[in-house]
Each structure stands twice: as C-alpha cells, then as structure tokens.
Amino acid sequence: MVANKTVREINPITKRWRRGLKRVALVYPNRYVGGIANIGLQYIYAEINSLDDYICERFYWDVFHGLRSVESGTPLGEFDIALFSLQYEEDYFKAIKIIEESGFKGLKVAGGPCVMENLIPLKGIFDIFVVGEVEGSIIRKILETIESGDLSSIPGIYTGKEKEVKRVKPERLEDHIVNQIIGEGAYGRCFLLEVGRGCIRRCRFCIVRQIYFPPRWRDVKLLLEVAEEGRKYAEKVALIAPSVTDHPKIKEIIARLIEMGYLVSPSSVRADTLDEELMDLLVKGGLKSITVAPEAGSEMMRDILRKGIDEEDVHRAVELAAERGIEKVKLYFMVGLPHETQKDIEEIVRMVEEVKRKIPRVAVSINPLVPKPHTPLQWIPYGGDPSKTAKENLKDLNSKLKFLKKELAKMSVDADTSSAEAFALQTILSRGDEKVGEILRKGKPTLRAFKQDLEKYLGELPVDAELPWDFINHGYKKSRLIKEYSVIMDMK
Ligand code: SF4
C-alpha cells in the first residue's frame, strides 16, 4: 500500500531506488483521476519496473504539481528519462510547465493520442516521440537502445529525421495486465478491464477509430480469468474500449462479472446497442445514470457525422433506463457542423425536450466540433461554414452556444457548453504546424497569439495541400478521406 497526502492506492509494484538503477518518470500532465484510469500507462509502469536496471515512478499534475513522484516524492529533476503521456491538447501547456519548473534535463519522450494525431507542434519540446500503442515492449526497446544505438531504427519512433513514421500496434490483444494499481480514478476505485481496442463504427468526426484501427476484441475466457484475479483487489470493474457494448460477447461478460460480485462500470455505451437484456444487466451491475451521444439534433446532421444512431435509438435507450428506475441521462451534442442551420440547432432543443418528458434529470453537454487530423472532416473550417471567415464562424458558434444555453435553461436543463475560443485553440494545436510549436514554446498562448493566421489555422484547409500530419502513417488511404470529404461537402 502506498499512501501520501493526496493519493491512496493499492500498488502491487513496490520497487525502491538503489544505486545503479536508472530512474524513469511516467508523467501524466493532467489530473490523477484520469491518469490512474488509463490502462496504457499501467502497462508501461509495470513493464519498466519489471526490468532489473530501471525503476519507474509516476507524476500527475495535481499531485505535488507534477514535480515530485507519487511513490517516493523524488523530484522530477533527479530522473534520467521522462515519458510524457499526452491525451488532450490542453496537456501541452501543463507538460511544458512541468518541464520548466522541474528543471528536468534528461531525455524527454512523448507518446499518447496527441502524438499519434499530430506531433509537429511538439517538436522542440520533446526529444523523441513514440507513435502507437506501446504496451511496454516498445518502451523496453527504447530504454535498451538509448545507450547503445540509433533510436530511429525502432518502429514507431520519430526523432525528427524520419520522412514517415508508421504507427505500431499489436495485431491481436493476447494478454491483459493483472498487476494494476488501484486508485480513485475516473470510474471510481476499480479494476480496469480492457475488452477491446479500436472501433467497428465509422463516425466521420472520430479520431479514435482512425488512430486505433483496426478494431480488436479480447477473448472472453481471458477477460474473465483476469477479472477473477482482479476481484481480490477491487469490488468494481471498469470496462474499457472506445465502444464497449459493441463487444460481440458483452452480455456474457457483464453477466459473469456480476456473478463474481463486481459492480460493473462501462466506460461507454452506444444507444443503439441497448436492449432490455443489456439494460437489465447494466442496472444489476450498478448503473445509476446513462450517457447517450446523439451528437446532433437533426437527422441530416447525424448523417453528415455518420454517427449511425437515430432518434428512435436515443428515445428507446432513455425509456429502457427510466423503466428500470434510472433517473438521470446525460446527452452529448456538437455544433459547428458543415451545412448546419438554425433549424438544426433548434432540433437539439426539441430532442432534449422530448427526452426530458421521459426521465426526471437531463444533463446536456455541447461542444464545438474540432476538425481532427486523420478524419474525413480534417479539412473543414472550425465552425463548419467554408463561405465564412474564421471570425464569422467563431461568432456564429458563440451565438449557437448562447442560444442553446438559453433555450435549455427555459426547461431547467443545465447545458454545459464549452467556449468557442477554447475549442478554437484546441483546433489550432490539433492541426498545427511548426509555427504553432514556436508560439507554444513561448508560453500558454491565447487565440490572440494567432490573430495574423486565423484563416490559415481555423479556415478550410486546401484539399490538395500536404498536411503537417500526413507523414504519420495510420494505414488509411488519404484519397479515401478526400472522397468522403467531397461527399460531405456536396451533401446539401
Ligand atoms: S462509436 Fe464512438 S469510438 Fe466508435 S467511431 Fe463512433 S464516436 Fe468513434
């Protein structure tokens, strides 16, 4: 058991530093609750600590300000290598702050979804990048090669010299980590069970399906054996995958987990996979509220996103939940889609109103759509309308968000809306080039820092231009994305 002022956790790996051991810092530049619920980091941590010559300790933004390790309180500056996991664009600012304030002088390695998305703005901040699902084996290779050889010879590594970098991934998910640290994470104190990786759906806005392609499921027998072991340490299990309920044997898995005495928390549930049997199981597993992501209010907008969920699915999911005593639903929407009109925005209000009649508590989250690299929507202007300037699109987004907040408040629904400016910055970092990196290195930028180049970074990107992230090979053909993009833009 490891404990300090802020963290209480069960940690099966207790390794103490002794002379001769190389120190590796695993840095999550965001909150502990997210970091401890990240199964990828658990793999890396266990792998490094299994090596004779290394010790790995963790750093989180909200534990000692990311400057001292959770395990021993050792300052980051005393470590030899720091592995940063970048999950969100906002993490860049925190990572930079941690590097600066700690005075860390060792080797800085970055990985995670943001690196797989577009690492170019991060060049000059980190020394090397790991593109892919690293599990642990690749980390072992990196550590071995740091002293002895050329890192660029390792697949999935970008050192700045490579013309192309191909994402690395295991073809099959053959094993599963048992030795996990159990802490108070995003899903509570629970054992993490990763049922699969990648997604069988083809939502056009979604980068997850692109950077974790192809979909791979874990075998039921393996999952249940691992869960049986994990039961010794936790009463709750979190099922992890981009779309958990798409696992072909999900009902059997949940039923068996309940038999083991687990409370079951699925990290994501698609409304169209819910039927009576699955809902019964989820309620039995302790489900208290449901989350549904229709993403848009009108059918036309959902077609553009190719979400594959229709309004009936949403209502049926809510009804199934309400019939079983669940009182709360959270709905997720996006605005700033191509061809979006005021009518489409009003459709969100109408849908929420209808849902509200079925279940007592409705919470709504509305975000502007961020055009993500590697997706068919990567070229769209932020705000969605190519006939408008970046400023006009921003203004429209603000008034759409304001309208929704006001209309939803009239029916006592609290809408959690993000600021159009914050998401604009996210778009710039997401689709950024080396110049964005230069600005980033000067300190946390506001949108004003990009005012000369707003059109370049927020406007529609030219389809025939080379994009900063084109050299990251995720296995798809760019021509297919271009084709899909022209289908979307011609949809009206
Ligand atoms: S179902 Fe979810 S994870 Fe899968 S493609 Fe759609 S948005 Fe992405």
Image (tube, grey):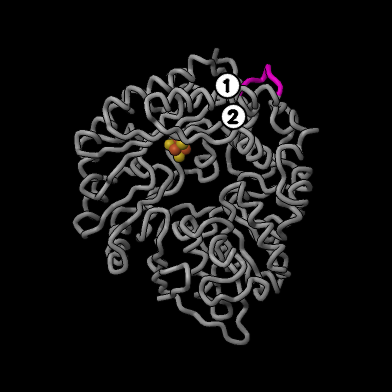
Residue 328 in the image: state x and y as whole percent.
31, 38
Q: Residue 310: tell me if it is visible.
A: no
Residue 416 in the image: state x and y as whole percent.
47, 36
User: What residue is disc 1 on?
Assistant: 338
Front: mark 1 or 2? 1
Ligand 1 is found in the corner quadrant, namely top left
Label 1, label 2: how far apart the Cα atoms are = 9 Å
Q: Which element carries disc 2, helix, strand or loop? A: loop
Residue 9 covered by magenta stretch? no
User: What residue is disc 2 on?
Assistant: 377
Residue 232 in the image: state x and y as whole percent.
28, 69
Q: How many numbered badges does the structure rendering display?
A: 2
The foreground one among 162 and 257 is 257
Q: Residue 289: tell me if it is visible.
A: yes
Q: Establish if 29 lies above or below 18.
A: above
Find out whether the residues at labels 1 and 2 contact each other: C-beta distance under 8 Å: yes
Magenta stretch secondary structure, dominant: loop
Q: Which residues are magenta?
A: 384-389
Q: Amino acid at mark 1?
A: Pro
Crowding near pointer 1: few (<14 within 10 Å), some, many (20+)?
many
Q: Quadrant of residue 418?
A: top right
Q: Residue furthest top?
A: 492
The foreground one among 368 and 157 is 368
Q: Establish if 94 lies above or below 248.
A: below
The first of marks 1 and 2 along the sequence is 1
Q: Which element carries disc 1, helix, strand or loop? A: loop
464 relative to 25 in the view: left or right:
right
Residue 274 in the image: state x and y as whole percent.
28, 35
